[in-house]
Image (cartoon, rainbow, N blue to C red):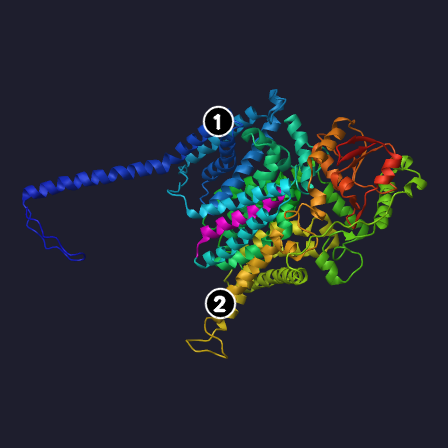
Amino acid sequence: MTSAPLLRRGAVAAPSPVTVADHAELERAAHAAAVAAERPSRRSRAWARFGGLLQLVLCFAALHGAVLLRPHGSAILVAVAFVVLVPGAVLLRALDVRPRGTAERLVLSVSGSLAVLLLVTLGVNTVGPAQGLNQPLSTLPLLIALDGVTVLLAIVATLRRASHPVPVPQRVSPLTAMLLLPVLVGVGTQVLEQRGTTWVVAAGLGLGGLALVWAAFAAKQGRDGAVQVVLFSVVLALLWSYSLRSKGLYGFDVQQEFAAFRTTAEALRWHPVDGDSYSAMLSITALPTALWQLTALSPLGVFKLLLPVLFALYPVGVYTAARRWLGPRTALLSTCLLFMTSSIAGQMPALARQEVALLLFLGIVLVALDRSLRRRGAQGLVLVLGCAMVVSHYSTTYVAVGAFLGARVIAFALRVMRRRSAHRPVLSLPVVLLLAAATFGWNGPVTHSTDNVTGFASSIAAHGFQVLPNGGGGSIVTKWLAGNVAASSTPREYFDSVAQTYREQHPWLSEHVFSPSAQRDFPATASEPPSARPWQPGLKTPLALLTTQVRQAGNLGVIAGAVGLLLLLRRRRADAELVALVTSVVGITVIMRVSGSASFAYNPERLAYQTMTILVVPLGITIGWVRGLLLRAAPSGERRRFGVRPDTPGRLAGVLLVAGIALVYLDASGLGSRAGGGSPPGNLSRDGEYAERFATTDQDLTAARWVVTHTRDDAIVFADRYGALTLQFSEQRDHHGVFPDLAPGTLDARALVFASSSNVLDGRARGTTPDNQLSATYVFPTSFLDQYKAVVFDTGSARVYS
């Protein structure tokens, strides 16, 4: 056989004469090459079909090995990774739900795992006692049940030929170094606790701001993965800067949540208490108990470390959802404007129940609005996530079901107007009605925890539908900006209001209060906590004004974008299902924000955490329009017009983008508040209002444990508003015997009085009326208590009086 000469790249070889022997040899070579090429393809098909099962087997081996080796640190990490990732990933395959991107797959895997774990704990807790298990939420029953459910889901996935493997990255991206940012902030919080030094936390949060600015440039290049990693790292740093403070838990609601958890953890069995909404939520009772038992992570670690890590995925999912309709920079700015708030960073670590429920709600929204998913599988996943949300948090569920029902009504109206959606909705009427039925059944016949709904109805019946929160004095603008925050009052006004409330609601206490002459010794004197010196004098007022203006502009942007969606729908350029859901959520938001009755029943800020998942789209539409107006103002060609260069409007849009992100981040991180002086944020100071409220010391916990172990279950204990939180955190019994007021007309002569370190060392106490209308900070009555009560326990900075 003659061979053709070597050719230049791109040249064509001339044909050569081929003999019969050569032809046979070529056929054999071609057959061998075909066989060799077919073997890898068969292996590839086998891996695609059964590789997921092999990965699952390896994960099972890792989990059970971790259970045997615990509480070793690496074993805890392995167990945590399995519990929060694997069940959800297998659930997605069993339902044949295939998300498009890595971030969406991760969010749905985590939310699906939480849903599976919630439903598994509920099933074990229900079936276990009938099988003779006195502690159904202990490690072995939970492990067996989780194994069984996961294997069953894997079998379903295999039968449906959906057991495809999870893609494994071939190399570690340098961008993963961004995950060291929350670690730095976490270390800084411990330095702040031990030494009072804030520069490590401040440096970490400052780097987070620079990372967000860099993400704006990465978004311009279309690097969604980089933006998502930055969002996760920065938000986790913000959450950890608060949650890792204090020897106990930092925040208000989380203390009561932990008390409900301890009741379940002590018995290793969940049992709701009639009328107690906290005990009815599995997200703060059975779920953390299961995480503690399966992973050996300490209970405090579950609340302070793990739940913030999971919730840090929330803004990532919000950005991912927004990217379906918005450009990358617009989606990033919209997410930051809605999410980067001081209340998010400071309050969400103290709302464990809502952290869990919002992740489940986010999963529902991502699935419901993803047109690339199979409808039946998506509806199945929505029902699983929805049922898990129902047992996690009643308020989140009420808002979600109300929004979905409203969307169905609006969609029907649009259909009448011939604005029908091009796709059949995932959140169809039967699916929404099933979620509504599950909500009614769980909060009604099962847990009897509808007091919040009946209380709201009673308030409406008694006082009417109040317009604007904070119904006291002040202008309409003041009421709107103040929201439903309690108004500051003098100690005397607070004492008189609380005393009247106690006489009406606890008349049995009035027989044992101190005499009027003794009560006159109670000093009704205001006491203000120390303020921090500003890093930059004169910055506080303009920064606060700019932040307020940006927030209110964001509210207007949401409304304008919602109206714009309706106009786009009229031109058939928007999806009717999206328009219906956005309109329903905007309506609920307006009602909750405008009505004083509704805002008292459910904090508008907490509502905003949930609605931002959907409202990010109309806000982004408004931002896109503004950006488009700026770009259209650019001169055509290379000529200047009125001295303006052609690229100036584009640069101005970029500057506004970076400035908006930086401004809201200064508010969220507390750096702006600390730089301007005044009351320092709790994550950047060991002194001041927030530190005195929530920073619990070892001495506080010691005194609280003494109260718990040396008193009967029916004992009466008085403390100020925040000292009562320490008692609720420490006790393992019902916490309704703790009265969070030290007003002269309420203090029982027979009761114990708990004094925290803030009371003893700083000499301050705090209180808020039960209707959340008045609050006061006053001098702690040390001289009064020393005269009329005896110190029965003293740690040097915390005391117990009897």
Q: Earlier in the sequence, mark 2 or mark 1?
A: 1
Q: Position of residue 559 (x, y in %)?
A: 61, 61
Query: How packed is label 2: few (under 14 Cα within 10 Å), some, or many (20 or more)?
Result: few
Q: Is residue 110 above or below residue 319?
A: above
Residue 403, percent from left and from top: 62, 51
Residue 580 seen? no
Which image quadrant: the C terminus?
A: top right
In this orientation, which residue lies closer to the viewer: 259 or 238?
Answer: 238
Q: Is residue 66 magenta?
A: no
Q: Is residue 724 above or below residue 551?
A: above
Residue type, numbered disc 1? His
- Residue 647 sits above or below residue 20 on the image: below
Are circles 2 and 1 on residues that touch, CB within 8 Å?
no
What range of the chain is rendered magenta?
Answer: 222-243
The quarter of the picture where residue 507 lies is top right
Q: Secondary structure at mark 1?
A: helix
User: In terms of depth relative to the viewer, which is nearer, 487 or 271?
Assistant: 487
Residue furthest bottom in the image:
642
Amino acid found under the numbered disc labelled 2: Arg
| Residue 781 occupies quadrant | top right
- Vertically, is 537 above or below 363? below
What whole-number distance in Å separates the C-alpha atoms at marks 2 and 1? Answer: 56 Å
Q: Confirm whether residue 786 shows in the render.
A: yes
Magenta stretch, main secondary structure class:
helix
- In this figure, which residue is indicated by the disc labeled 2? 651
Residue sitting farthest toward the right: 517
Residue drawn at (56%, 46%) of the image: 237
Left or right: residue 465 compared with residue 322: right
In the picture of the structure, the residue carrying the numbered disc 1 is: 64
